[in-house]
Amino acid sequence: MPRMTETPAPAKRRWKPRLILAGKFVLFALVAGGIWRRVSSHLDELTAERTWSEVWQGIDPLWLVISGVFYIAALAPAGWFWRHVLGRLGQQVAWRDLLRSYYIGHLGKYVPGKALVLVLRAALLPGCDKAVAVVAIFYETFTLMATCGLVSAVILAGAWATQLPPGGTASGLWSLLALALAGITLFPVLPPVFSQIYGRLGGSRLIPGMAERVHRLRFADLAGGLAANVPGTLLLGLSLWGTLQALSRGEAPLANWPTYTAVMSLSMVAGFVSLIPGGFGVREFVLLELLAPLVGDKLAIEATIVSRLVSVLAEALFAGGLFAVGPSKSAVKKPG
């Protein structure tokens, strides 16, 4: 009987796993490099006039941890809404996989172009149609930014009307800016507009029947997303309060929570609309301008730098933990 010889695997198949592995290393390097650039630049600013010892002596580290926990929790409602939108588009995703994808994907915003956010989040959803995931990411992100704009506009308008800090004409102008940014981010996710945008971009050719799925998104879904994100903005305010507590050794009044919420929310949506990776510079400018009348220039500068450090490190550590946990064993269920 002639001896059977094993047919060698095609070269393309042998190289595919290596290319995937190399791609993962490249993504890791891009994310790590982006995060390091942000962290190192802020550390340089923080220690420009003082030594590390002097800086550390003026900070309560426990409050920094609390601030980071509040920041991570603030992102969770948007993660829930992303899952809701995926469900409306025909994708039922396990919570473990969704949260893992969502938080790890946030690290992509520190890489120029911001496209890595889409790549990471879509790639980390096992069994989910990548194009559907991207559509849902756009809808979830713009809804979150619209919520940030609306919340900050309302709070700052109230500060202007009652002359509370930051008060005066400045609060009125900042409120108008927040309202304008809310309009810019809300308009594209109005269900009829979103359907038109999707059709004009030729998205229907990517996935058969996808246009019909996009039409499932109703005003009730958008309203639910806006409402769900409001607690997230309040947690952002608590995150800033925690940072101020750390820097002032527990003397930051919680009574200013609404203002903290407006400051963080407006800085986030302004940074997003700027299209700069991580909103670098824009978020800091908004934070500094709105915090200075409230807490003074020195504390405002320190809080601006430290709050950014807290957010970056909290995201990196939490995402790293989720990455180590790994995906769930269950596959994504696709309804017929």
Image: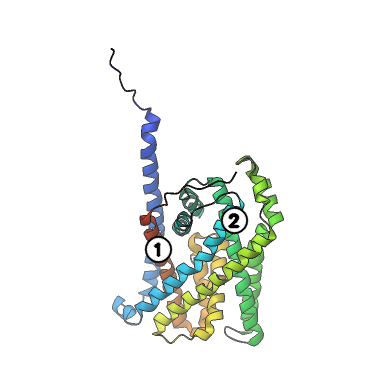
The answer to whether residue 192 is seen in the rendering is: yes
Residue 122 percent location from the top left of the image? 50, 50
Q: Residues within 10 Å of mark 2 (few under 14, many from 20)?
A: many
Residue type marked 1 = Phe
Going 65% across and 50% down the picture, which residue do you hit?
Answer: 214
Q: Relative to 326, say whether 163 is above or below.
A: below
Residue 228 percent location from the top left of the image? 58, 67
Earlier-in-chain disc, 1 versus 2: 2
Q: CA distance from mark 1 to mark 2?
A: 24 Å
Residue 183 percent location from the top left of the image? 67, 65
* SS class, disc 1: helix
Q: Residues within 10 Å of mark 1 (few under 14, many from 20)?
A: some
Dividing the image into 4 quarters, which one contains the N terminus?
top left
Q: Relative to 265, say whether 127 is above or below.
A: above
Q: Relative to 6, say whether 75 is above or below.
A: below
In the orientation shown, which residue stands out farthest toward the right?
Answer: 192
Circle 2 is placed at which residue position? 85
Circle 1 is placed at which residue position? 318
In the orientation shown, which residue stands out farthest toward the top?
Answer: 1
Going 36% across and 39% down the picture, which residue do you hit?
Answer: 18
Find residue 179 and name its label.
none
Quadrant of the image occupied by residue 269: bottom right
